[in-house]
Amino acid sequence: MTEPDDMARLRDARDANRRVVAAESFESIRAERTRWLWDGRIPLCAPTLLVGREKLGKSTLTVALAAGVTRGTLAGDLLGEPSSVLLLSYEDSASSTVKPRLLAAGADPARVFQASAQREGIRDLVSLPDDVEAIGAIIQEHRCRLVVVDPFSASLAAEINSHRDQDMRRAIASLAQLAEIENAALVLVAHFNKSTNGDSLTRVLGSRGLTAACRSVLVFGKAPDAEDGSPDRVLAHAACNLAAEAPSLTCRIEPRVIDSDAGTIETSRLVFLGDCDTHADDLLATRGEDERSDREIAGDWLADEMAHGEWVKAAEIKARAKSQGIAERTLQRARVHLGVEDRREGFPAVSEWRLTVVPTTTGTTGTTATGTTEQPRIAEPDTTPSDIQSCQIQRTGTTDDAAGAETTVERVRRIGQMTDEVAAEQAWCELQREQGAVAG
């Protein structure tokens, strides 16, 4: 084949994929200074990562930032320019948690928006990067200058592996491009993993691609010198590619009571107190007054990994858990507590796991004084879509169950709620043996 023929084939392939790669001289590119939503901490046109331990008030911090944007009081390039905000919250109830916090923070609720999706008429989660185009339309329509995704891991489409650098970089790239086009700030919220080694950047849950793709990384945690139960917090800069790291800030989560049509509501707000010398790595060793056990944290991780309800090789789950610092014994206790099914298929037999009763954040009971949200462990069987997410529950009980008899789903839930872990494991093994006998 001649060289012209080769070039023609390449052109045909390019046209078929509608993908063009071209060069551009830097002479035609105008140099611009970095513009900031919040001076030195949160840039416009780029992604920022906000990371910290669970249940210490990261979401309350994002509400405080949103309030400042809607009032035009946040120090930065939008100072004096009230703007709109898009909050994509996957853990907190819009009505009982987010709205009260916005009111307590003094936000203009008319400038704060949430987004929801529908699939075949049923309410569904906003999924990224699948819904980026729709999110872009919302940002354009309402001229949003701040977009918060809380937590970012919950927004990812099922095919995105949060532990693969390539997957995470591609997911963030589409959002980052959107932020650049719309001149908006993008804040992605994340948690620390279970590892006890490493610094604040290596301790972020998921792939290293997450921290690498974000231009600014902020760590939020309990003040190291604070007494147990203290509402004192610190916001520290762990990394910044666009400017020198900003000074750390002390802040406090204060309880608030607001009046509404439904009566008085207890909520919280975050206030900034001033600069401090705390380093981001100093916040790794702090423990929240309500920090959960290793099994509960492992359970949340496992529920997130298996929320799709499909069979997954147990070896793959164990390998991912190990990479997050979760011991296999802790993982097994979390599996029993959640009621994860276990089967052996093939020859030689391979162990596979599946979660059919999916924990959810539906039915939040309100906001504590420290800005955290109390949530039930296991979702009740309900075919009505929730305010935040919809979940499918597969009933595995037999049709011969007598009226009033405990179904398999009810039994799994009862085992999952047992506080005696040894008894729970024994009950789960007994259920597995019975199910295996029925299948045989």
Image (tube, helix red, strand yellow):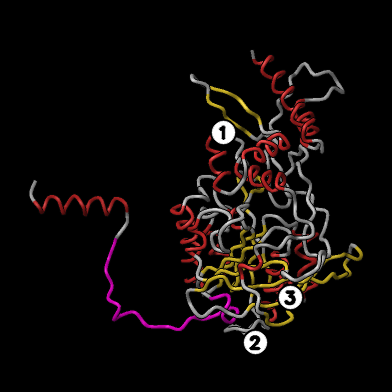
Pick out the residue farthest to the left: 2
Tell me which secondary structure the magenta stretch mostly adopts: loop
Q: Nearer the viewer, residue 113 or 227?
A: 227
Q: Nearer the viewer, residue 79 or 350?
A: 350
Q: Position of residue 58 (x, y in %)?
A: 69, 65
Residue at which label 2 appears: 80
Residue at which label 1 appears: 314
Q: Position of residue 394 (x, y in %)?
A: 68, 31
C-alpha span from label 2 to label 1: 54 Å
Could you say which disc has been placed on residue 251 in the image? 3
Q: In terms of sequence position, does the residue under pointer 2 or pointer 3 come before the other?
A: 2
Q: Nearer the viewer, residue 41 or 356?
A: 41
Question: Could you tell whether 415 is left or right of 173 in the image?
Answer: right
Q: Which stretch appears magenta?
A: 21-43
Pick out the residue farthest to the top: 440
425 magenta-colored: no
Position of the C terminus, as image quadrant, is top right
Task: For mark 3, give the secondary structure.
Answer: strand
Numbered disc in front, either 2 or 1:
1
* Residue at the spot 73% in from the left edge and 60% down from the top edge: 287
Q: In terms of sequence position, does the residue under pointer 2 or pointer 1 come before the other?
A: 2
Asked if the residue at tag 1 contacts the one at tag 2, i.e. Cβ–Cβ closer than 8 Å, the answer is: no
